[in-house]
Image (cartoon, rainbow, N blue to C red):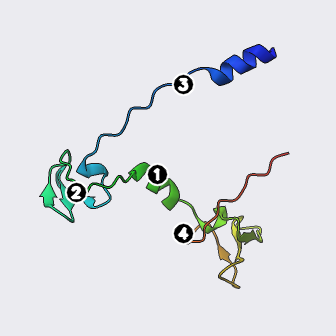
Amino acid sequence: MKKAEKLKQKVRPQEKIKPVKRACKNCLKGVLLCFNNDVLCREKGIVSGDYCCSSHRFFQFDEFNKVASFRCSDCEFFILHPNEHIPTYGVCDLFSVRKCDGSTRKACSKFLRRRDYSA
């Protein structure tokens, strides 16, 4: 490719992202009820999922799931000492001296995602 073509691809307008509508179903203060589509709000009680009050605070559940799924073995501070049976066996450099399986423990508050080193 020529430099001009590469530049055009970088500058090409991308798809517009629609703003997320404010509603109790994406609020930090709301908890979804399992038996219907209503939300239990700390401020207003049980409300419809489309309702929105003045104290709304955005909370993206998808982003939370991505962070919550990280394990100790994905952390920069986790030193791997793999053995023949457990490839994610190691020790946390910050909090522990005992070796454990890093894939079974959830990441702590000091989590820093391990960089991918590629040649």
Q: Which residue is mark 1?
A: 63
Q: Which residue is mark 2?
A: 34
Distance Cα–Cα, label 2 vs label 3: 37 Å
Choose mark 1 or mark 3, whichever is in front.
3
Q: Label 2 sits on what residue type?
A: Cys
Q: Is residue 17 above or below residue 70?
A: above
Q: Label 4 sits on what residue type?
A: Lys
Distance Cα–Cα, label 1 vs label 3: 21 Å
Q: Is residue 98 above or below residue 43?
A: below
Q: Kindly state the secondary structure of the residue where label 2 is placed.
A: loop
Quarter residue 84 falls in: bottom right
Q: Label 1 sits on what residue type?
A: Glu
Residue 80 horizontal/vertical position (percent): 75, 69
Is residue 12 found left or right of 114 in the rendered image?
left
Distance Cα–Cα, label 4 vs label 2: 25 Å
Q: Residues within 10 Å of mark 3 (few under 14, many from 20)?
A: few
Comes first in the chain, label 1 or label 3 = 3
Q: Which residue is mark 4?
A: 106
Is residue 14 found left or right of 4 in the rendered image?
left
Is residue 95 found left or right of 61 in the rendered image?
right
Which quadrant: the N terminus? top right
Q: Which residue is mark 3?
A: 14
Quarter residue 2 falls in: top right
Would you say the residues marked 2 and 3 are in contact, meaning their CB atoms lie under 8 Å apart? no
Taking the spot 26% from the left edge, 60% from the top edge, the residue there is 31
Q: Residues within 10 Å of mark 2 (few under 14, many from 20)?
A: few
Residue 78 horizontal/vertical position (percent): 70, 70
